[in-house]
Image: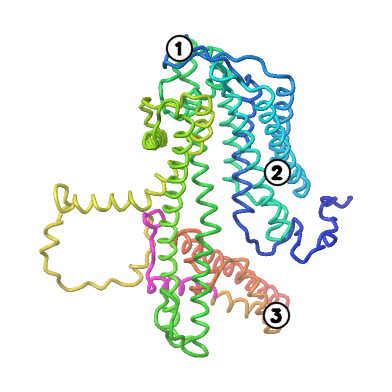
């Protein structure tokens, strides 16, 4: 058989790129520690989910004319003058087409980069160049239109397509800058040359692309059946899927009403999937790069404190670490346990309130900046900043009173982009509030109900009951794993005494395995016998751990009952294999005796 050919980039001469002490381009198989987590993980995710939206705005800019006549003698159903578009210069259409092709090419090469069809060092610069070219061509077209063929006010004005081109150029420029930051982090050696995306993040990219395609399908369909412009049809599709229901553009024909029902249902389903994936991906990124690093810093501080106990007492232990205990004793082991428990509780508290604070900050930024923009571009209808805040908040909550709607040619395209960012942000904020504000409110209502109209049975009797003798239950009964403990909320946490019982039970199988290994491999030297036992121990699972070590149960990514159950299952497998080895050894001894 011919040996499998390795990818071409594995033979790449990486040393020739180290021409500057600050530049260090790492190969794809580099396992060194990574930093710049925002540039390595968040930026590719933001770029992949935003680029389809930029393509949509670019399609609107190409599908419609950029200028329109304003007929003040005719009004639409909202009382605004009727507008009709007129032709654009040929160079404007050509530049729009070039920009759209470049934008789509940048998006395609970014997807090739994610799937590793094209090398990172090739695909990423191509995406950056394509989006820079898309920005340059759109800016050139916008500038040339404004200089050489501007509409004559007040009888003429720019259409929604013109403002869609402005938004698309801003998005393309933002995407190019973000990927340039990602490339800079790679060149400086902060991470290897690939996008380390998880399955949930890849699912988010796929769902976002599907959602944008569904928006375009709706725009194309309702553009025909309602007889409105393509940009208005896109705005109508966006308002329908987000369940805003402004009512400024209703489905007026029978065909539009019939198509709006299935279109809205499918759109809401896709939107729900996108919002859930956004929430899951953002939480995943924050957990891996912020929360766990916070826990690791606290754990390292605790380790340094306990290491110092072997040399000299530490006068000021880190927060959450109990007073020192004699090194190498059971009190020290208990102190390490309580230190790690304190770190675990502190990390849980930090995670909840960090997520809530970041969500509130994102919500405030999206809300206030959106209000400023709407206040500026909707000044024609006399919109104040307070009314813009009111409109933005109603849109974020998908209330949709319809008393204030975007009515200018610049307002509708901006609302499409802003709403697709704002609504998932609001949904994420509500989800984060469920762990803190909503949970506290629920507990308060439960306590109020217990002492007022809906008390638990015996609630008042327990208040006046005289405490009798305290019944001491056996430790083994306290440490028993209840079937529902692995799925309880909040997760079950065992005491140090219970963990001692579990640890003794898990290690008992290891002691028996060591005795069997000593008997089975009696002919081997002690060091080789110890290595053989260590190899089997690694194959079966963990036998011993340090409470503040990396193998600590409180640093695992699952609940404590699940962790204990896994270790007990490993112990069971170890004992079963020990029984098989003993039977095989006894059989071999019987055969040797019979031969003798």
Disc sitting over residue 115 in the figure: 2
Label 2 and label 1: CA atoms lie apart by 52 Å
Disc sitting over residue 528 in the figure: 3
Which circle's residue, 3 or 1, is located before the other in the chain?
Answer: 1
Q: Which residue is mark 1?
A: 75
- Residue 353 position, x and y percent, is 41, 57
Q: Which of the pair 284/15 is nearer the observer?
A: 15
- Residue 566's place in the image compared with 400, above or below, is below
Q: Secondary structure at mark 3?
A: helix
Query: What is the quadrant of residue 210 in the picture?
Result: top right
> Does the magenta run of residues contain 339?
no
Mark 3 crowdedness (10 Å alpha carbons): few <14, some 14-19, many ≥20: few
- Residue 61's place in the image compared with 83, above or below, is below
Q: Tell me the residue at 61%/25% (across/down).
A: 60
Q: Tell me the residue at 61%/29% (across/down).
A: 57
Count every numbered label the image shows and give the total: 3
């Amino acid at each position: 058989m011919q040996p499998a050919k390795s990818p071409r980039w594995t033979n790449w001469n990486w040393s020739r790129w180290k021409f500057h002490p600050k530049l260090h381009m790492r190969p794809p198989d580099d396992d060194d520690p990574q930093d710049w987590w925002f540039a390595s993980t968040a930026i590719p995710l933001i770029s992949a989910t935003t680029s389809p939206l930029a393509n949509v705005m670019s399609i609107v800019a190409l599908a419609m004319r950029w200028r329109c006549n304003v007929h003040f003698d005719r009004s639409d159903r909202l009382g605004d003058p009727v507008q009709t578009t007129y032709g654009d210069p040929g160079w404007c259409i050509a530049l729009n087409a070039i920009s759209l092709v470049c934008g789509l090419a940048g998006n395609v090469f970014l997807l090739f980069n994610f799937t590793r069809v094209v090398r990172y060092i090739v695909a990423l610069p191509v995406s950056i160049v394509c989006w820079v070219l898309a920005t340059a061509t759109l800016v050139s077209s916008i500038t040339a239109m404004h200089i050489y063929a501007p509409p004559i006010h007040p009888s003429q004005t720019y259409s929604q397509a013109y403002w869609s081109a402005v938004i698309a150029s801003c998005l393309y420029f933002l995407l190019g800058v973000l990927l340039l930051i990602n490339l800079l982090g790679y060149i400086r050696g902060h991470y290897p040359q690939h996008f380390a995306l998880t399955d949930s993040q890849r699912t988010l990219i796929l769902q976002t692309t599907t959602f944008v395609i569904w928006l375009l399908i709706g725009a194309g369909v309702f553009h025909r059946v309602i007889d409105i412009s393509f940009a208005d049809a896109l705005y109508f599709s966006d308002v329908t899927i987000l369940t805003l229901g402004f009512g400024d553009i209703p489905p007026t024909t029978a065909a539009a009403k019939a198509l709006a029902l299935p279109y809205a249902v499918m759109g809401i389903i896709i939107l729900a999937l996108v919002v859930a994936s956004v929430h899951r991906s953002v939480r995943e990124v924050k957990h891996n790069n912020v929360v766990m690093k916070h826990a690791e810093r606290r754990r390292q501080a605790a380790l340094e404190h306990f290491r110092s106990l072997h040399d000299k007492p530490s006068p000021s232990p880190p927060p959450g670490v109990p007073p020192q205990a004699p090194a190498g004793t059971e009190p020290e082991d208990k102190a390490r346990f309580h230190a790690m428990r304190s770190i675990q509780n502190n990390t849980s508290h930090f995670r909840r309130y960090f997520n809530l604070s970041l969500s509130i900050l994102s919500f405030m930024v999206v809300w206030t900046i959106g209000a400023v923009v709407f206040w500026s571009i909707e000044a024609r209808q006399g919109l104040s900043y307070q009314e813009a805040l009111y409109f933005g908040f109603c849109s974020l909550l998908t209330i949709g009173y319809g008393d204030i709607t975007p009515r200018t040619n610049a307002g509708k395209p901006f609302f499409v982009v802003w709403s697709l960012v704002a609504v998932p942000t609001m949904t994420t904020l509500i989800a984060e509030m469920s762990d803190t504000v909503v949970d506290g409110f629920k507990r308060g209502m439960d306590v109020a109900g217990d002492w007022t109209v809906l008390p638990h049975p015996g609630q008042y009797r327990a208040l006046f009951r005289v405490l009798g003798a305290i019944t001491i239950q056996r430790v083994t009964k306290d440490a028993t794993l209840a079937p529902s403990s692995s799925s309880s909320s909040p997760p079950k946490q065992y005491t140090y005494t219970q963990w001692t019982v579990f640890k003794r039970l898990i290690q008992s199988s290891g002691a028996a395995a060591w005795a069997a290994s000593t008997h089975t491999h009696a002919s081997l030297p002690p060091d080789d016998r110890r290595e053989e036992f260590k190899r089997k121990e690694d194959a079966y699972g963990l036998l011993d751990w340090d409470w503040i070590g990396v193998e600590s149960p409180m640093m695992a990514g699952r609940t404590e009952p699940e962790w204990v159950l896994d270790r007990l299952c490993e112990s069971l497998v170890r004992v079963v294999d020990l029984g098989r080895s003993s039977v095989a050894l006894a059989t071999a001894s019987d055969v040797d005796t019979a031969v003798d």
